[in-house]
Image (cartoon, helix red, strand yellow):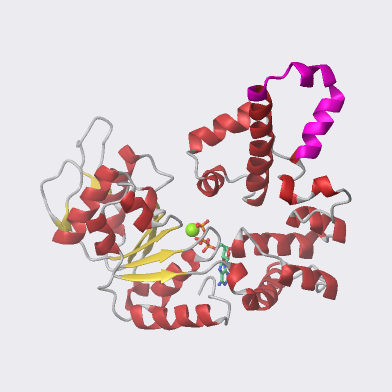
Amino acid sequence: MDTPLVGSSPSIQKIREIIRLVSQDTSLNVVITGETGVGKEVVARVLYELSPRRKKEFVKVNCAAIPDTLLESELFGVEQGAFTGAHRKRKGKFELADGGVLFLDEIGDMSFPLQAKLLHVLQSGEYSRLGSETNITSNTWVVSATNHDLKQRILEKKFREDLYYRLNMIQINIPPLRERPEDIPELITHYTRHYQDKYPDRVIAPLSTHTYGRLCDFSWPGNVRQLVSVLQRILLIGCDDETLSEILHEHPAPTTPDATPANGNGLVEKLRAMAADSPEAMETFSLKAIRKNATDLVEKEVIAKVLDRTNWNRTHASKILKISYKTLLTKIDRLNISEPN
Ligand SMILES: Nc1ncnc2c1ncn2[C@@H]1O[C@H](COP(=O)(O)OP(=O)(O)OP(=O)(O)O)[C@@H](O)[C@H]1O
Ligand SMILES: [Mg+2]
């Protein structure tokens, strides 16, 4: 098995039990939910590995990464000559996953029109390649994942309720790591061993008790993915306490009352510094301009922080910030946020 599901918190034990039962009855479609980095793909792969379908393919489709126009042919395939440029027949993911598992990642981002087509396939059990009249019987176990609240998307009319019930026959919700901190030591042990095995020529020193304690106490907003990447860095490059603080974004205890988060992460202090730099500018500022500046300042701080935590994965960052990918790019540009080298 690629990545085992590490952890023995009550919630992970319960998930393991659901996986054990569900993997034996692959007629029930599954939706895996949870914040980014909690292990939704790990769970999907374990479901596949334990099911009788493991002899066939596990086919992953990222519904958010593929433009809508391409996603349809990606899912259902294309008949030769279906449109200009379709020089030869191409199988779709449904066909490739025949007898196996179709993992629809980021299902909450699928467009409304395509949701209707997917629903049709799930209801009829049949589909056809684009440009073909011939029906193909679908025999795949559909496992989906999302970090959206699908019920909320239904209320916003962005997700079809009928499709939701088709996909969500079984729901597996993975809680964030901060709600199951007892899994952290096991994850540290597992991934320390993993990196030692991966780099057999290197002597990887175990974590100091102090660092170990800090990792166990941290709240991990980026969940297991963030823990794994921080741990990898510590084990392979080393990391002093101060650097670790920077990585974890835990700033040293504030020295002035203004620097406490209560006033907006040092915002007042920054505005004061701006005034000190250019008092005349402060005088001529309209309240509107000050408000705009303050908003920009806060936005810049928050966006930079989220980008940093997601390792500059803009798709993830835009989801966390609940803005579109395009808006995020515009903001990065306008607020002059630069990626560290
Ligand atoms: N319980 C776990 N045991 C071992 N590794 C885990 C576990 N949960 C997550 N990981 C590791 O954390 C990383 C992120 O996991 P995964 O890709 O499954 O998250 P995800 O929920 O699909 O995130 P996203 O929503 O961002 O796609 C991977 O490296 C994965 O191997
Ligand atoms: Mg994922």
Query: Where is 335 relative to 3, above or below?
Result: above
Identify the residue at image location x=22%, y=57%.
Answer: 162
Q: Is residue 121 left or right of residue 184?
A: left
Q: Residue 265 in the image: state x and y as whole percent.
A: 73, 46
Q: Residue 104 in the image: state x and y as whole percent.
A: 37, 57
75 or 7, which lies in front? 7
- Our reading of the magenta stretch's main secondary structure is helix
Identify the residue at image location x=60%, y=63%.
Answer: 223
Query: Where is 211 relative to 83, above or below?
Result: below
Looking at the rendering, the stretch of residues picked out in magenta corresponds to 268-288
Is residue 112 a member of the stretch shown in magenta? no
- Regarding residue 335, the answer to whether it shows in the image is no
Q: Residue 275 in the image: state x and y as whole percent.
A: 82, 26
Instruction: Name the quadrant of the C terminus.
Output: top right
Identify the residue at image location x=69%, y=38%.
Answer: 339
Q: Residue 215 in the image: state x and y as whole percent.
A: 74, 68
